[in-house]
Image: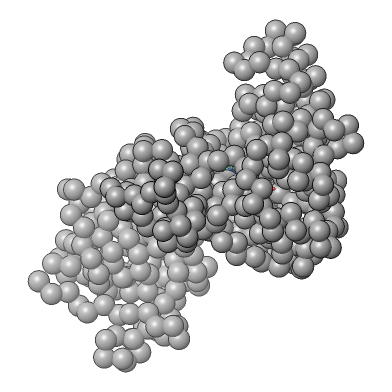
């Protein structure tokens, strides 16, 4: 059976059929626009069928094109649409509906679309279509990542992800920051932590060897050992020392074997870097930035946030409104440790020990933000031993000008610092940490030619998304998660 040839959408906004004749009265629209249209408007809705329900004399179709949380209700009066077309209008099918916007008697929606004509782009076998109306588990949805974007939950996640990404660029562009695209392939380790993926074209079955029996990377694609970047920070520092204020926004990669709900092997990071800025300025920017992004989402993703609040975590909306309107707490690492030590002597038990010099674990971070302060907390001035080589040494010579922003439920969402801008101090740290000095020659040279105090931080996009949406697993806020043992799709 041949369906009517569907009308297509053209960039000029006019609908035409395949003969090129303007076909429809109103240009192709998103369903979110149809919700705002006046009754009586003739229009076309295109999308994927969520559900279909037949009752006496009428068929109801819920249609989604991803443009907004709500589905558009299509009303088909029996007899209007030929049965041979209607039989293909089942869950999962992709269709166009030409019709008229009418007032909806149904609760919770203002208008619906009364179908005059339906065209089927692609039918879907409803007996095997994996995405059914009944709620699916997040694990199940991960296994069908090619269809997951059509689910209510992931649809809402992705619209919020899009809005946050836009708000991030808007925030920095409004403040005159230059957008830097840092390289993804690199030959230096920005964090000095060694958790990097290799990039190589060498034949693994037949590796070239040096006379000492080592792998001969001189014969590799880049003539030396190369990796996927863990952070664009070092390159951002180069640019900050030329353009004053810059930010990166791109993917970063970590080969740490962390099978947790908060870690990905590939995640997106935003890294502002500011010349003429110290740790206090850094802290203020981080707070202003998070509040801006949250306020933007509250203003622009209302329906999606209401869904998260209703179905995922009923504290999400109150939390976001609270954060947008209150100041973050600030403690030094030393103060944080004494708060935790007091908690321990008061009977609180942690899995990991608490003492000055220990790294804060997720449970400690969550205690500080969920129990002590009940809002985001910025912890600064960590012991130098547990932080990266590039952080500026304090006068006590024991702590560095580090800063972590901790959020309830998530723990760390931002890590940053004032950078060590003094050549001798930096060189000493690189040597003491046994890092390969020759890899950092240019980073050191920046401290020789026109150095300046500077600072910056990194926000994990997926971590802020978890915070904003209430989603429990980081794998459900990125389109195609990469984690140990899994990189499908
Ligand atoms: O604290 P991190 O490692 O800091 C840096 O990479 C610095 N170079 C940033 C800077 O100062 N420019 O990472 C920054 C943030 C973390 O706070 C967290 O939100 C996120 O990146 N992050 C991860 N997100 C998901 N999966 C992982 N494996 C992550 N590792 C870090
Ligand atoms: Mg960190």
Establish if 314 lies above or below 187. above
Question: The N terminus appears in which quarter of the rendering?
Answer: bottom left
Task: Give the left or right position of residue 397, taking residue 155 as reference.
Answer: right
Task: Give the left or right position of residue 325, taking residue 23 as reference.
Answer: right
Establish if 115 lies above or below 333. below
Residue at 28% x, 48% y is 205
Inspect this view and state whether residue 70 appears. Answer: no
Residue at 36% x, 46% y is 487
Ligand 1 quadrant? top right
Where residue 484 sits, quadrant-wise, is top left
Residue 379: percent from left, percent from top: 77, 34
Task: Give the left or right position of residue 473, taking residue 457 as reference.
Answer: left
Inspect this view and state whether residue 169 appears. Answer: yes
Q: Residue furthest right?
A: 395
Residue 244: percent from left, percent from top: 79, 64
Residue at 16% x, 61% y is 87
- In front: 435, or 367? 435
Residue 284: percent from left, percent from top: 82, 48
Q: How is the image coloured?
A: one colour
């Amino acid at each position: 059976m041949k369906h009517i040839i569907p009308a297509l959408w053209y960039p000029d906004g006019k609908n035409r059929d395949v003969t090129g004749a303007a076909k429809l009265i109103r240009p192709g629209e998103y369903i979110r626009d149809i919700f705002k249209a006046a009754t009586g408007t003739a229009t076309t809705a295109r999308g994927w069928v969520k559900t279909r329900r037949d009752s006496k004399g009428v068929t109801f179709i819920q249609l989604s094109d991803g443009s907004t949380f709500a589905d558009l209700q299509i009303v088909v009066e029996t007899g209007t649409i030929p049965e041979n077309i209607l039989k293909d209008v089942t869950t999962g099918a992709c269709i166009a509906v030409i019709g008229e916007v009418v007032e909806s008697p149904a609760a919770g929606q203002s208008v619906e679309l009364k179908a005059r004509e339906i065209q089927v782009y692609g039918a879907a076998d409803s007996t095997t279509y994996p995405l059914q109306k009944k709620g699916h588990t997040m694990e199940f949805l991960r296994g069908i990542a090619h269809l997951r974007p059509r689910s209510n939950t992931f649809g809402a996640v992705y619209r919020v992800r899009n809005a946050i990404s836009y708000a991030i660029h808007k925030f920095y562009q409004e403040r005159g920051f230059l957008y830097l695209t840092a390289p993804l392939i690199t030959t230096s380790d920005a964090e000095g932590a060694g958790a990097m993926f290799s990039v190589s074209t060498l034949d693994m079955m037949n590796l070239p060897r040096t006379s000492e029996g080592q792998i001969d990377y001189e014969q590799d694609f880049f003539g030396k050992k190369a990796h996927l970047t863990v952070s664009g920070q070092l390159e951002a520092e180069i640019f900050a020392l030329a353009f004053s204020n810059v930010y990166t926004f791109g993917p970063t990669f970590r080969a740490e074997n962390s099978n947790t709900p908060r870690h990905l092997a590939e995640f997106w990071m935003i890294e502002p870097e500011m010349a003429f800025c110290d740790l206090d300025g850094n802290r203020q920017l981080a707070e202003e930035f998070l509040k801006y992004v949250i306020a933007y989402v509250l203003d622009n993703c209302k329906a999606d946030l209401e869904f998260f609040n209703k179905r995922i975590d009923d504290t999400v909306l109150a939390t976001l409104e609270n954060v947008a309107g209150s100041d973050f707490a600030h403690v030094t690492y030393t103060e944080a440790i004494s708060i935790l030590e007091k908690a321990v002597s008061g009977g609180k038990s942690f899995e990991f020990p608490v003492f000055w010099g220990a790294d804060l674990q997720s449970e400690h971070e969550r205690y500080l933000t969920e129990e002590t302060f009940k809002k985001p907390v910025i912890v600064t001035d960590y012991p130098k031993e547990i932080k990266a080589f590039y952080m500026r040494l304090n006068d006590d010579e024991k702590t560095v000008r580090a800063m972590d922003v901790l959020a309830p439920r998530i723990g760390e969402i931002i890590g940053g610092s004032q950078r060590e801008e003094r050549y001798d101090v930096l060189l000493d740290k690189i040597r003491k940490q046994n890092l390969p000095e020759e890899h950092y020659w240019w980073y050191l040279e920046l401290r020789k030619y026109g150095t300046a105090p500077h600072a910056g931080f990194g926000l994990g996009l997926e971590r802020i998304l978890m915070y904003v949406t209430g989603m429990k697993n980081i794998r459900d806020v990125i389109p195609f998660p990469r984690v140990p043992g899994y990189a499908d799709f």
